[in-house]
Image (tube, rainbow, N blue to C red):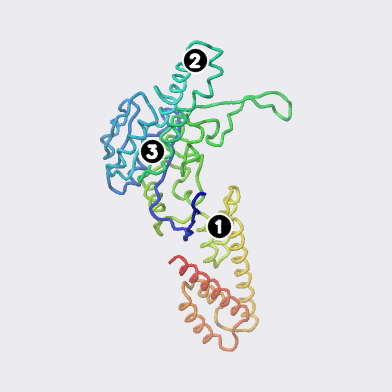
Amino acid sequence: MNAERKFVFKPAVLDNEYLLIGLAGGTGSGKTYSAMRMAVGLAGGKRFALIDTENGRSRHYARQFAFDRADLTAPFRPEAYQDAIQAAASAGYPVIIVDSMTHVWDGEGGVLDWQEEELDRMAGDNWQKREACKMAAWIKPKGAHKKMVSRLLQIRAHLILCFRAEEKVEMQRDPTDKKMKIIPKVSPVGLNGWIPICEKKLPFELAASFLLTNDAPGVPKPIKLEEQHRPFFPLNQPITEKAGEQFGAWARGDASAPASEADQLLDGYARCVDESTFEQLEKRRGELWKGSSPHKARVKQASDAARKRLDEAKDANADAGKSGGTPDAAAWIEKLNACESLKDLEACWLECAEQFGVMVPPKLGDIYESARERLTERAALADDDL
């Protein structure tokens, strides 16, 4: 019998994760330059390594970036890639760029060529036998590629993989006129018909991947981009060193890394004390709703809570006017909602009570209780993070 396997579960902590990032595009789309800019930010002032399969083209950037390079030439076997990347990691480089990762699949001596070599070895010019051996001829090449990917996932460095991409189309019947039409090919690993030239499963291993196009070099078009990473990559400007810095900070578990859009909205709603701010937050929430965010319910609750606070503030101000009280209820509502700690809230409430005396509007008390509940919950969450 096999020995019983034991499993130990621990709290999930983001701490020094190593990123696997993909940049895909056609010629002139800015893949290499964007990868280098991102690498500078990720490396934090240290030199990065570049594995060059493009006939030494990386030397064109020698005056713009401080990096070390090595040439990888044909045959582009998976083992050669694996050895080159491992050598860079063993040398201590914090970031490794592979330009290009396409050659291991489609280059001279890559997986596609290797499969053809295996087919020649197994069947020669016997075309009937070649048909029978096609699947078996993939065993060695794909096995080596799978092993290479497994090793990449264990590398203790950030990896930026550059892929060539090609535009593909497919035929689809139009549901309205029933005619066949040519449309950009739909793929889970591509965008707008542009597909990275690589083994089809590799893109699923990437933490983030982008399509770059020659009409807007360096400007990222997300293929895969998780919500918590969106603040690092503005979609209306080229990828910069700052993107690398912020992505790296997130991977280290740095609390100073920019919050996700959902977190920013949650914090905004918690601090919201006026209608103008609320309207701006609602516009941003509308943008979030267009995507597939898992935090929609939490953001909706925060929006509802902010709306309720604003309505209560209006009622409290109206009550103060009816009672003829001289203190400005609206000002006290803003002060109570602006408190950042329970200690500050208690001091603010005492001062408020002194000014209003027995004429404190009931709604103002409701806002105090709401603020107290919010700050108590925030303190509890902070304790959990510690």
Amino acid carrying label 3: it is Ser
Give the class, few, some or many, for how many residues have Cα within 10 Å of label 3's Cα (few <14, many ≥20).
many
Residue at screen point 44% across, 49% down: 232
Estimate the x, y position of residue 192 in percent, counting from the top left.
Answer: 55, 33
Amino acid carrying label 1: it is Gln
> Which circle, 3 or 1, is nearer the viewer?
3
> Could you tell me which secondary element the residue under label 3 belongs to?
helix
Upstream in sequence: badge 3 or badge 2: 3
Q: Which of 349 and 165 is in front in this view?
A: 165
Q: Nearer the viewer, residue 37 or 152?
A: 152
Estimate the x, y position of residue 140 in percent, counting from the top left.
Answer: 45, 27
| Residue matched to label 1 | 280
Image quarter of the C terminus: bottom left
Residue at screen point 51% across, 81% down: 349
Is 11 placed left or right of 16 in the picture? right
Estimate the x, y position of residue 375 in percent, counting from the top left.
Answer: 51, 72
| Residue matched to label 2 | 123
Q: Which residue lies furthest to the front in this view?
A: 1
Mark linked to residue 201: none
**How much space separates mark 3 and mark 1, taking CA atoms?**
32 Å
Q: Do the residues labelled 2 and 1 touch (CB within 8 Å)?
A: no
| Residue matched to label 3 | 34
**How much space separates mark 3 and mark 2, taking CA atoms?**
45 Å
For residue 239, above or below residue 276: above
**How much space separates mark 2 and mark 1, taking CA atoms?**
68 Å
